[in-house]
């Protein structure tokens, strides 16, 4: 059997430069988790179906289980890199305020996808949010609160406190948005998903 080739990688992750040796065929997900111990990025299906491994590379949301670490060309942001020391990213804050926090497997990827969307498009429509998060699966609960949280983070230039207060004052819930079904019904945001 031929020996597996090891390569020396230089990665910029969450603002920190890392040099790591890893087998050439290892994915970004494996390197983040196994070499850098950044276990917030989850290895779910490991074949591109669930979105649990989503990270930002150069500001774009990518599936780290389908990305070779040696092919990474740009700074990487994982869930550990959202927000700052002692401060939440507006996406994290909005998920908290909306009660959209779910399990540790699906949540990091959802937040990273949301951050990638808002960096590219600060005022997305509900359909654009659905589309951006369509690759992030939750097998056990719904998506309504998540959509509400991304709308909240997007509102008023990501001023979450102001947006949340406005929503409470005006009694605006996600079900009141014109293209969301009334009654807060659970939504289908991904292909083949029905929650
Ligand atoms: S672990 Fe990458 S998409 Fe599921
Ligand atoms: S998979 Fe995380 S709450 Fe369902």
Image (cartoon, rainbow, N blue to C red):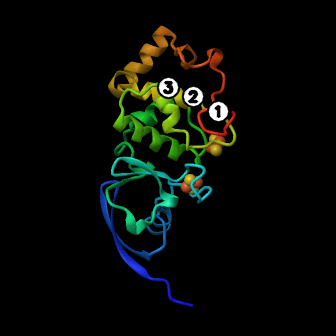
Classify 151 as above or below 37. above
Residue, x 48% and y 57% (percent of image)? 64
> Could you say which quadrant of the image residue 73 lies in?
bottom left
Secondary structure at badge 3 equals helix
Secondary structure at badge 1 equals loop
Residue, x 35% and y 38% (percent of image)? 119
Residue contact between numbered discs 3 and 2, judged by CB atoms under 8 Å: no
Q: Quadrant of the N terminus?
A: bottom right
Residue, x 69% and y 34% (percent of image)? 194
Secondary structure at badge 2 equals helix
Q: Is mark 3 within 8 Å of ligand 2?
A: no
- Is residue 138 found left or right of 173 in the rendered image? right
Could you tell me how far apart the alpha carbons at marks 3 and 2 are, in whole angstroms?
12 Å
Could you tell me how far apart the alpha carbons at marks 3 and 1 are, in whole angstroms?
15 Å
> Mark 1 highlights which residue?
142
Q: Where residue 97 appears, x then y in whole percent?
A: 50, 27
- Crowding near the residue tagged with mark 3, few <14, some 14–19, many ≥20 C-alpha atoms within 10 Å: some
Q: Could you tell me how many numbered marks the image carries?
A: 3
Q: Nearer the viewer, residue 173 or 83?
A: 173
Image quadrant, ligand 2 = top right
> Could you say which quadrant of the image residue 173 lies in?
top right
Q: Is mark 2 within 8 Å of ligand 2?
A: no
Q: Nearer the viewer, mark 3 or mark 1?
A: 3
Q: Where residue 185 appears, x then y in whole percent?
A: 66, 22
> Mark 3 highlights which residue?
126
Q: Where residue 174 appears, x then y in whole percent?
A: 54, 19
- Is residue 73 found left or right of 149 in the rendered image? left
Q: Nearer the viewer, residue 176 or 87?
A: 176
Residue contact between numbered discs 1 and 2, judged by CB atoms under 8 Å: yes
Could you tell me how far apart the alpha carbons at marks 1 and 2 are, in whole angstroms?
8 Å
> Mark 2 highlights which residue?
145
């Amino acid at each position: 059997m031929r020996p597996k080739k090891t390569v020396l990688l230089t990665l910029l992750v969450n603002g920190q430069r890392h040099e790591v040796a890893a087998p050439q065929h290892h994915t970004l997900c494996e390197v983040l988790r196994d070499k850098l111990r950044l276990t917030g990025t989850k290895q779910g299906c490991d074949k591109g179906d669930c979105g649990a491994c989503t990270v930002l590379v150069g500001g774009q949301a990518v599936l780290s289980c389908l990305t070779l670490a040696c092919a990474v060309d740009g700074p990487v942001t994982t869930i550990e890199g959202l927000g700052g020391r002692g401060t939440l990213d507006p996406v994290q804050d909005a998920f908290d305020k909306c009660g959209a926090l779910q399990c540790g497997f699906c949540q990091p990827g959802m937040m990273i996808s949301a951050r990638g969307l808002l960096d590219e498009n600060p005022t997305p429509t509900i359909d654009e949010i659905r589309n951006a998060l369509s690759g992030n699966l939750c097998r056990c609960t719904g998506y309504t609160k998540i959509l509400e949280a991304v709308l909240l983070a997007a509102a008023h230039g990501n001023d979450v406190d102001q947006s949340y207060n406005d929503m409470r004052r005006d009694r605006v819930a996600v079900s009141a948005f014109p293209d969301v079904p009334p009654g807060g019904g659970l939504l289908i945001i991904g292909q083949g998903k029905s929650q």
